[in-house]
């Protein structure tokens, strides 16, 4: 019964997930690039600063649903690198576990963004709007 109630709302729920995750991710970038609500700000051009720039740009792109597949794929890779390099550090001891190395968010973002990259923008996205706009009327071109 719950499945029947929720499944018609799957596209809207996906859009909500994409938008919220994108905005949260972009906020991490804002913190790194502009020092918003933090006392730490990496030096301009450093690896952390570049990561923040990627977070800011790809987060807003995913939230808007613009070039979603590319943005999400880049964000996923960035978070995979962040997890391995800054959290796990290839330590096979206690630090192997995300609860210990404090890498849960990076790992979840990496997997979530990989999923978003496979789904694309979906409803409420610039990608969908552009696709509809490119479809020529009267040609029989259907837009999903």
Image (cartoon, grey):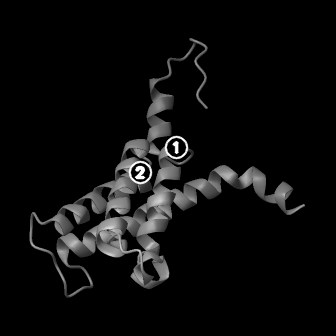
Residue 78 screen position, x and y as percent = 32, 58
Residue 67 screen position, x and y as percent = 38, 42
Quadrant in which the C terminus is drawn: top right
Which comes before the other along the chain, label 1 or label 2?
2
Mark 2 Cα shell of 10 Å, populated few (<14), some (14-19), many (≥20): many
Q: Residue at coordinates 46% horizontally, 55% vertically from top-left?
A: 113
Residue 29 screen position, x and y as percent = 28, 68
Which one is nearer the viewer's eye here, 126 or 61? Answer: 61
The disc at residue 12 is none
Which residue appears farthest toward the left when viewing the image? 44
Residue located beneath label 2 in the image:
72
Do the CB atoms of the residues marked 1 and 2 lie less than 8 Å apart?
no
Above/below status of 36 relative to 110: below
- Label 2: element kind: helix
Above/below status of 142 relative to 138: below
The disc at residue 118 is 1
């Amino acid at each position: 019964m719950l499945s029947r109630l929720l499944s018609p709302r799957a596209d809207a729920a996906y859009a909500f997930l994409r938008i919220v995750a994108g905005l949260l991710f972009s906020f991490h970038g804002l913190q790194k690039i502009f020092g918003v609500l933090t006392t730490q700000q990496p030096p301009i051009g450093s690896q952390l600063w570049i990561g923040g720039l990627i977070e800011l740009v790809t987060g807003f792109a995913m939230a808007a649903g613009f070039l979603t597949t590319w943005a999400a794929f880049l964000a996923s890779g960035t978070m995979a690198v962040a997890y391995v390099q800054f959290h796990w550090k290839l330590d096979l001891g206690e630090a192997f576990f995300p609860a210990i190395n404090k890498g849960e968010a990076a790992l979840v973002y990496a997997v979530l963004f990989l999923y978003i990259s496979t789904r694309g923008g979906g409803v409420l996205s610039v990608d969908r709007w552009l696709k509809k706009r490119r479809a020529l009327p009267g040609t029989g071109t259907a837009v999903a």
